[in-house]
Image (cartoon, rainbow, N blue to C red):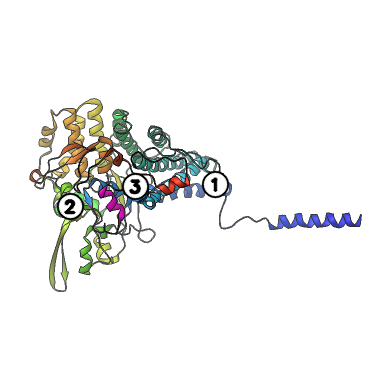
């Protein structure tokens, strides 16, 4: 009995030790702990503004931003530092594959799926968070769904079929997910965006007027863009009418307008875009504050690498990381179009004081839209937001979608004329309307494509438009402002390389394929 008593006491002591040694971590929270207060739900959504695809618009001084890759493969943009930036070399030479750019594509794939995982977690738990009102639940879920859609949109346009994961991971089961067909991924993107538009209770406002949070217009604009894209390749599901409906939700709200020109060219709408973060034209902006998270090197890529030697910038290096090729610049009529004039979208000279002497430097044409005097010459820190979607693009989406679904109506003509008239600032708008009136649907749609090229040239839409239309823009120095379109498959780029069907999608990293044996590679790689 004594031995039995001693054994029972020992077992009891061990059990009490187990209880004593059980700890609740203070430095991290489980999912059950995390969604305990409204602030937790807000934090779960707030982090999505800075995870995955939104970060691809911020640039490095050497390699540019991930959003620039399509411009490189088109041959219409160059990078002064491509000697060391192999993703630029392989894109221009059309030699990219899942091995030689494995690390580069890993970065995009991993970042997007991290964002999607966080969005899935938010969607699964927001409604269960105590003390959130119904309107807060709807708003936060709408924002989470927007970012899930935004990241899947990047993935599906970049890689085609991708694994569609909608559940929050809470175990190691089902890690090796197969690729989901493009059409099915797009259906989920549309479902998420329709929820945000129709059920999120979001205000239909410009983002700056909405405390820089996703608004109904943000979701509707992305939805219109998605419908426009699936109407083309590779899905070819005629959704132009739906694109028009989504775009009209923004237009008919009356809350948006194109930035107007000031009294001088230095006060043009395009210079306002360069300087201001609070315009009614902005539908989705990525917000920056240099004291918290700055927009890094964006101003420094407004000058060639040789400008570093001038010794006048607060940045240690400059690099024309998204240098427009002449074939790109020829899309503009250099007599009529304000956008191609010096210090509008682009520039090629700088005048500054060196002591008592005025010095003027000239250089190859570089982007000016990202130029920031304060960051370049005073602080070395850039506060400027990156605008991803503008009202001008909504008007162009509406013009194309209406023409394709309803014909070349006065409404469609008006939207295209609004954008073009701002650029052709010395041409009467009625003359522009007259030129567009009477065009066939095909002729009018090509005019919209041309205007997209000109208006969105520094907003990374060129490759996406080539993908969906299968048409490559062709220009000629002798006829600046004139653009024709060539079948992209078989088109020879300015680098003498012939584009093939496979190049319309990028390869999946072989590193990722080794991690997930159920992933297949894109055809041709």
Q: Which badge, 1 or 2, comes first in the chain's sequence?
A: 1
Among the two numbered marks 2 and 3 on one chain, the one whose residue lies closer to the N terminus: 3
- SS for callout 1: loop
Q: How many residues crowd around disc 2 within 10 Å: few (fewer than 14), some, or many (20 or more)? A: many
Position in image of residue 382 (x %, y %): 31, 59
Check if residue 90 falls in the magenta segment: yes
In the rendered image, the quadrant that contains the N terminus is bottom right
Q: Is residue 223 left or right of residue 117?
A: left
Circle 3 residues within 10 Å: few <14, some 14–19, many ≥20: many
Q: Which residues are magenta?
A: 78-94
**Mark toward the start of the polypeptide (1 vs 3):** 1
Q: Could you tell me how many numbered marks the image carries?
A: 3
- Residue furthest bottom in the image: 355
Residue at 44% x, 44% y: name it.
116
User: In the rendered image, which residue does mark 1 sit on?
Assistant: 35
**Mark 2 secondary-structure assignment:** loop
Residue 223 rendering spot, x and y as whole percentages: 34, 36
How many angstroms separate mark 2 from mark 3 (CA)? 37 Å
- The mark found on residue 344 in the picture is 2
- 393 versus 69 height, above or below: above
Badge nearest the viewer, 1 or 3 = 3
For the residues labelled 1 and 2, the Cα–Cα distance comes to 48 Å
């Amino acid at each position: 009995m004594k031995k039995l008593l001693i054994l029972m006491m020992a077992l009891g002591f061990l059990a009490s030790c187990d209880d004593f040694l059980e700890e609740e971590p203070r430095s991290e929270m489980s999912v059950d702990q995390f969604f305990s207060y409204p602030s937790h739900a807000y934090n779960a959504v707030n982090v999505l503004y800075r995870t995955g695809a939104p970060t691809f618009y911020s640039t490095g001084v050497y390699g540019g931003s991930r959003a620039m890759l399509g411009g490189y493969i088109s041959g219409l943009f160059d990078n002064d530092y491509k000697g060391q930036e192999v993703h630029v070399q392989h894109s221009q030479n059309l030699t990219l594959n899942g091995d030689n750019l494995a690390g580069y594509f890993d970065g995009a794939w991993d970042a997007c799926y991290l964002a999607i995982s966080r969005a899935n977690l938010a969607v699964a738990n927001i409604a269960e968070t105590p003390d959130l009102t119904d309107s807060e639940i709807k708003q936060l879920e709408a924002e989470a769904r927007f970012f899930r859609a935004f990241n899947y949109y990047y993935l599906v346009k970049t890689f085609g079929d991708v694994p569609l994961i909608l559940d929050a991971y809470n175990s190691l089961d089902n890690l090796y997910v197969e690729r989901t067909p493009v059409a099915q991924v797009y259906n989920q993107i549309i479902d998420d965006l329709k929820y945000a538009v129709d059920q999120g209770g979001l205000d239909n406002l410009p983002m700056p007027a909405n405390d820089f949070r996703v608004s109904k217009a943000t979701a509707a604009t992305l939805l219109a863009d998605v419908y426009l894209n699936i109407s083309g390749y590779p899905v070819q599901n005629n959704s132009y009418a739906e694109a028009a409906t989504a775009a009209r939700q923004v237009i008919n709200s009356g809350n948006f307008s194109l930035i107007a020109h000031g009294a001088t060219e230095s006060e043009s709408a395009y210079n306002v875009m360069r300087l201001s973060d609070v315009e009614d034209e902005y539908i989705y902006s990525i917000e920056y504050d240099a004291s918290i998270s700055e927009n890094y090197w964006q101003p420094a890529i407004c000058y060639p690498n040789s400008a570093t030697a001038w010794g006048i910038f607060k940045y240690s290096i400059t690099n024309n990381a998204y240098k427009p090729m002449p074939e790109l610049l020829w899309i503009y009529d250099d007599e009529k179009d304000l956008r191609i004039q010096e210090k509008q979208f682009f520039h090629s000279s700088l005048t500054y004081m060196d002591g008592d002497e005025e010095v003027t430097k000239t250089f190859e044409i570089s982007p000016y839209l990202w130029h920031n005097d304060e960051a370049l010459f005073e602080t070395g820190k850039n506060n400027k937001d990156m605008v991803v979607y503008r009202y001008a693009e909504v008007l162009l989406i509406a013009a194309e979608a209406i023409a394709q679904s309803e014909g070349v109506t006065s409404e469609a003509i008006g939207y295209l004329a609004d954008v073009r008239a701002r650029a052709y600032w010395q041409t009467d708008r009625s003359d522009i309307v007259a030129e567009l009136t009477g065009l066939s649907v095909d002729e009018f749609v090509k005019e919209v494509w041309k205007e997209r090229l000109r208006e969105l040239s520094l907003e990374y839409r060129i490759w996406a438009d080539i993908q969906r239309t299968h048409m490559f823009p062709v220009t000629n120095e002798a006829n600046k402002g004139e653009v024709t379109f060539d079948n992209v498959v078989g088109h020879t780029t300015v680098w003498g390389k012939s584009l093939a069907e496979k190049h319309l999608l990028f390869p999946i990293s072989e590193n990722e394929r080794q991690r997930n044996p159920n992933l297949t590679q894109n055809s041709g790689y």
